[in-house]
Image (tube, rainbow, N blue to C red):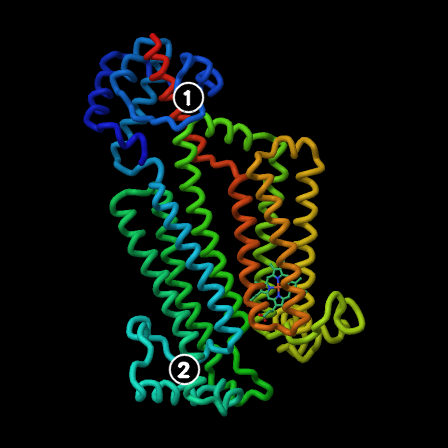
Amino acid sequence: MLPLRNLSYRRLAIGWRRVHTASIPPTRSTLPTSRILSQLPQGSPLTQSRPFSFTSNLSATLKTETTPLGGLATSITKEAVKKTSAWPETSDRKVGYWLLGSAGLVFGIVVLGGLTRLTESGLSITEWKPVTGSLPPLSHADWVENFDKYRDSPEYRIINPNMTLEEFKFIYYMEWAHRVWGRVIGLSFVLPATYFIVRKRVTPRVARRLLGISGLIGLQGFIGWWMVKSGLQDDLFVKPGSVPRVSQYRLTTHLGAAFALYVAMLWSGLDILRENRLFKDPKLAIETLEKLKSPQLRAFRGLVGLLGVMVFTTAMTGGLVAGLDAGLIYNEFPKMGTGYMPPVKEMFNTFYSHRDDNSDLIWRNMLENPSTVQFQHRVAALTTFSTIVAVFLFSRLNSRVAQAMPKDVRKGMMGVLHLAIMQVLLGIGTLIYIVPTHLAATHQAGALALLTGTVVLGHRVWLPKVAARIAGQKLQAAAVRAAARKI
Ligand code: HEM
């Protein structure tokens, strides 16, 4: 529960009037935290590492008007009066847990989505009915009707002409479960988000984030259908050599949006929980913030940010591999055929160019040619992996960084290294065993696990500026109260 909520706003308002009638110049405190802490009486709760409640005794605060810290008291009381706008200065801890739970649901749907693709189930439902589609066919006649629609699709005609109704039911249920899971995520996010915003259980900043995430969930539903539509187009019947599968561009966009949604939920949840932790224990807050402010950590922080971008980019190149079924060729490692890369002529093949002057040769091959796309994923993955190893070594061998690094950051870096090793091994396994469902699905989950590790590490090493500002204000207010009590 937010400590300052315990303040009575009526009493604050009375306090505000008293401060003004005392005509104390409203100077703003510039006292450094160390000086504030040094002014604390012996045995003050602030000097002890245990949960400390900021529940305010306003009269104690007001007494400080006559103390040398009176100016400070004035500004703090003003701050407190501003709180009458009713938005809390930190979001409820429950919101943090709920966001982490929502991120867990997104993790689950990514894995289920991968399984849906790997079992070739994604094109079994040929319509998009956001409300009525929540139920599967309930009668035999309904099943036959849905099967008939599927039999009209390119995938059935070109790849599955012998599929039975029973086999169809399996692929239908896979895709249906994926869509229902999406609806569950939507409802279990939007309804509580509305409640938390309306009841002002979150800060305005978090409220804006919740609205953004809700919008992204809706957008993801549209992207999903836009992707499925690309695998149902009639021109797949006429284009020679067409494979009825969804566009790799749309699949990668769908994967990228899911990863972005996941990161937004995870980061916001971690933020809220950390803020609550910091505000509960000011001594811990000061120690943590001082450590994170250390200039030795600045370069490391930047490198962790870079790792996040690299893991995300590598995952997107993996999405292209999956979308083009590019894992079904060159099933060896580290070589690709007779060399370490396919012949240049094959990698930049004019077959993929759409223009007479071949001006689109490079980018078309990089996004549409399975050989080039697989090579690209290998290069991206190995570059990301080497960078993770390099950052790990930097964090351990550079003594200044190693000393400045908080313990949880150290552990987080070790975790990222382990996840990266596991992910590379899973990728190689997926490739050399020619994309078996269990390995490919685990490799996809591994990508999200590696991203999670990087986000958690980034969050641990990031300086929470807003939390630091609020913790500083709270500390000052508490210090003033404690000093006043001493007088
Ligand atoms: C940092 C390391 C890596 C990351 C983050 C990563 C990420 C990904 C992702 C997100 C996918 C898409 C999965 C899907 O949508 O179903 C993928 C697919 C794939 N990756 Fe990786 N990968 C990494 C390393 C590797 C390595 C080293 C190899 C092999 C040399 C590899 C081989 C593959 C293959 C063959 C696929 C296609 C699997 C399929 O069709 O489902 N990956 N990767």
Secondary structure of the residue carrying numbered label 2? helix
Q: Residue 169 bears which disc, if any?
A: 2
Residue 71 point in image, percent of width and height: 35, 15
Q: Is residue 143 above or below residue 96?
A: below
Residue 430 point in image, percent of width and height: 63, 68
Q: Nearer the viewer, residue 486 or 303?
A: 486
Residue under label 1, please give it: 46
View quadrant of ligand 1: bottom right
Extreme residue in the right direction:
338
What residue do we see at 60% from left, 39% from top?
Answer: 410
Q: Amino acid at mark 1?
A: Leu
Residue 469 point in image, percent of width and height: 43, 30
Task: Specify whether tag 1 is near ligand 1 (CB below 8 Å).
Answer: no
Secondary structure of the residue carrying numbered label 1? helix
What residue do we see at 46% from left, 81% from top?
Answer: 232
Disc tally is 2
- Earlier residue among tags 2 and 1: 1
Q: Nearer the viewer, residue 261 or 240?
A: 261
Q: Please rate how many residues cluster around mark 2, counting C-alpha atoms within 10 Å: few if below 14, some from 14 to 19, many from 20.
A: some
Residue 399 found in image quarter: top right
